[in-house]
Amino acid sequence: MKLKTVVVLAVASLSLIAGFALAKPKLAPSVSTPEAADKMIVIKDTTKSVNVFENETVLFKVGDKQFAIKFDGNNAFYDLSTLAPPGVLNRKVKVNVAPTPAQH
């Protein structure tokens, strides 16, 4: 009986590991160049959230400053103020990252 339990646990563990191996890796957003941007989003004082797609490079304009971010990896939520250069965005703006339309 103990051997059967060990075998079942081993098979379950291997299945879990295989599932992680097949899952798409989570990649963090990365800094990009303004020239590489697919679109531009202006962040105003009233902006609370923005929507982007996976694998999209976005140029963000905040007042007279700008920065570009490439959103790689799985869909997720980010706080744009943690991705912006220091001093550019001093409040939370939620970034919703959706799967690219071709993935539906």
Image (spheres, rainbow, N blue to C red):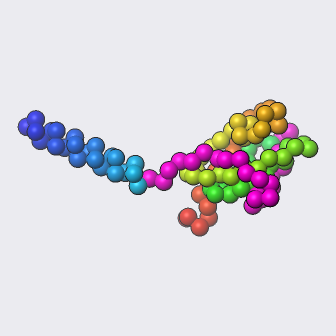
Magenta span includes 104: no
Q: Kindly tell me whether residue 57 is visible in this rendering.
A: yes
Q: Residue at x 84, y 40 (%)?
A: 46
User: Of residues 80 and 65, which is closer to you in this image?
Assistant: 65
Q: Residue at x 33, y 46 (%)?
A: 16
User: Of residues 45 and 70, which is closer to you in this image?
Assistant: 70
Q: Quadrant of the C terminus?
A: bottom right
- Expressed as whole percent of the image width and height from the top left, the position of residue 87 reads 82, 33
Task: From this view, report whether residue 56 is shown above or below residue 65.
Answer: below
Q: Quadrant of the N terminus?
A: top left
- Expressed as whole percent of the image width and height from the top left, the position of residue 50 reads 73, 48
- Expressed as whole percent of the image width and height from the top left, the position of residue 93 reads 74, 39
Residue range highlighted in magenta:
23-46
Q: Residue at x 65, y 51 (%)?
A: 71
Horizontal side, residue 31 vs residue 45: left or right: left
Q: Residue furthest right?
A: 64
- Expressed as whole percent of the image width and height from the top left, the position of residue 39 reads 77, 59
Q: Quadrant of residue 103?
A: bottom right
User: Of residues 18 and 47, which is closer to you in this image?
Assistant: 18
Horizontal side, residue 101 vs residue 41: left or right: left
Q: Kindly tell me whether residue 96 is visible in this rendering.
A: no
Q: Residue furthest bottom?
A: 102
Q: Quadrant of residue 82?
A: top right
Q: Residue at x 87, y 43 (%)?
A: 65
Q: Quadrant of residue 43?
A: top right
Magenta span includes 39: yes
